[in-house]
Amino acid sequence: MGGGAGVLFDRWVGVVLLVAGAALFGETFFFRTFDWDPVGMAFWPRVLLGMMAAVAIWHIVKGRVAADAAEPLTSRAFAVFGGGMVYVLLLDIVGFFILTPAALFLYSLWLRPLSARAAASSALAALFGTGLVYAIFEYGLDVILPRGILG
Amino acid sequence: MSIEIGVIASALSNVLQPWNLAFLVLGVVGGLVIGIVPGLGPTMAVALLIPVTYVMPPEAGLSILIAVFVGGMSGGFVTAVLIRIPGTPASMATVLDGFPMAQSGRAGAAIGNAIVANFAGTVISAVCLVTFAPLLAAFALEFSFAEYTAVCLFAMTAVAAITGSSASRGFVTAIIGMLVACVGLTPVDGLPRFDFGIAALEGGFDLLPALIGLFAVSQMMKESDRQAGATPQPVSAMASILPSIRDVAANAFNYLRSGLIGTWVGVMPALGGGPAALIAYAQARNASKTPERFGHGAVEGVIASETANNATIGGALIIALTLGIPGDPTTAVLLGGLMVHGLQPGPQLFLNNPEVLYGIYFSLFFSSVVMMLVLFLSVRVLVKVIYVPRYWLQPVLIAMCVVGVFSLNNRIFDIGVMFAFGLLGYVLERLRYPLPPMVLGIVLGPLLEANFRKMLAADGLLPLVTSPIALTFLVLSVASLIWAARLRTKSMPSVDAD
């Protein structure tokens, strides 16, 4: 985030909140209602969404509500999230025992300058990490981890 | 609420079980390690450990979590003194005098006095916890819907108002937290809402994946930027770390004052260890006959800071256990740990599960002793953890997060929720939107909704002003808003100047 958009980032947060809030407010009209409950289960979310809309409008009007500047959002951080979601999608199919060491190896390698030595120690870290959580959770806590293609 | 000797004896014997003691020591060591590593803190440590405690009896599980809390809060001073980087934000004030002491060859004295200060702070706040928590819980037993509504409103406004640089940003995250808590079954009707036809959302978001995402995954996303070119800092040499009896005796009042300040600040929602340490540091400086030494290596400054930040533990536990209001993010996660074990924080906890409470008290005392012993015996070894490369540490931590979250319900969906909250936490923190109000919103949202709706259905809004307790908390809520508005007005010129 740089330039004017960065300086007035609260305004953009306000816009996002207002749009998301409007969508959620619309959703509350699909909640079930009962004659015996005068308040209803949509009441509380609507109160919250109304308050959020008020604060969002305040942010849009002000543009920026405090002196401190936002820190930049980096692609590396989003890559961690993306990698995590890919892991989630593949976990049930591939299984913990194949996917986790592979994911940890790639993650560890990605965090450092590439070299043969780095690859070897990242492989060790991946195996150690997988082994540690396997020992703690599967042996220690009786958690059955997804087997995937290993069956 | 009478004192039951049998329950106390049972709780003590439980904590003293060899396995429980071993777990307590492991918890303190684990917390210290995470506290020493800059960037990681007690919140993440407790969040990571909750799944591991899931299969244990509540007493044993909570004992470990308390031990990790104490260890995590205590470890932060080590790097503050040795490399001028506080391991946790709570040790910010320790840098001011701890690092100058290390530079002048007194690193050992700074470390030794900080260890004793951490012990003193924890014990002072633990005494306050044992003394005042039952009294507050007995008082809270009188609460009805209106009083709970008012207390929750006060907690929400106070947290939103005092965290971060802007009250309105705090309100935004508090409201997001309460909206997150709206997903799934409602606390009053037991029917799903905001599920968007997705079966997995009908039960709502589990607290733990959300908390681990917000505090652990978002932290790793931030850390992912710092890998390249990171070189270990040189660590100052330590001579003897045993503090002199003269230093300890001369600071007896400093320990007490800072401990009480830390406990009081801990009771206030969302202030936490960092502000407590700064307030105690300022008070120690004001009370000193030689205030000019502060900032240049005054051991009193280190003692004040470290006593106060650890004293917030007991203070935060007072309102967390009696009212279910977390004093800081770590306590919020700890409340999540209580709920995972099927325990509801609040005055009923004192009636229904006294053995758990006494277990928490004993764990706090034992953890402080273990923390002191472990640090005196092994701080030279523990400090080497700062040399463990992040590219080894982070994969192990993220594996712990993933499997820990999966183990709660054996649902891969929860891992996705964790990463989604990690992204949300990362974006919000980068935009300077504080996370503690969001956690409070998630924890208190259902409580506030249930009590507010029941109050409306029974008597309307009137009890909020006719009940003296509810009215008091409403006045406090308004006061905190006015205070926040005044603070904001003072900071306006700098906003506009930009």
Image (spheres, coloured by chain):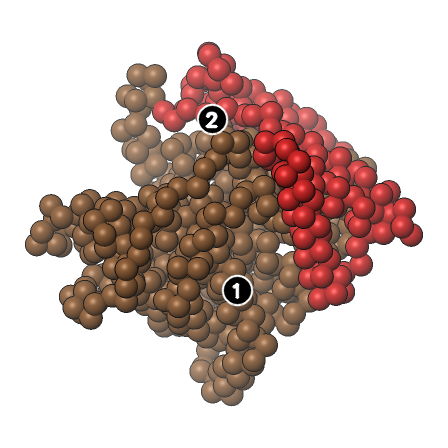
- Residue corresponding to mark 2: A71
Q: Residue B221, image x and y in percent?
A: 58, 36
| B412 in relation to B267, above or below | above
- Tell me the distance, in whole angstroms, between the alpha carbons under discs 2 and 1: 34 Å
Q: Mark 2 falls within which chain?
A: A
Q: Residue B49, image x and y in percent?
A: 59, 58
Q: Residue furthest top?
A: A4
Q: Residue B195, image x and y in percent?
A: 75, 39
Say which of marks 2 and 1 sits in front: 1
Q: Residue furthest bottom?
A: B6
| A103 in relation to A59, above or below | below
The residue sitting at 48% across, 35% down in the picture is B230
Left or right of B74, for residue A94: right
The residue sitting at 12% across, 54% down in the picture is B288
| B41 in relation to B352, above or below | above
Left or right of B422, for residue B471: left
Chain A, which colour? red
The residue sitting at 82% across, 51% down in the picture is A146
**In terms of depth relative to the viewer, which is nearer, A41 or A68?**
A68
Quadrant location of the C terminus of chain B? top left
- Residue corresponding to mark 1: B27
Quadrant of residue B245 within the rendered picture:
bottom left
SS class of the residue under badge 2?
loop
**In terms of depth relative to the viewer, which is nearer, B330 or B338?**
B330
Residue type highlighted by circle 2: Glu
Q: Which chain is brown?
A: B
Left or right of B346, for residue B278: left
Quadrant of residue A141 within the rendered picture:
bottom right
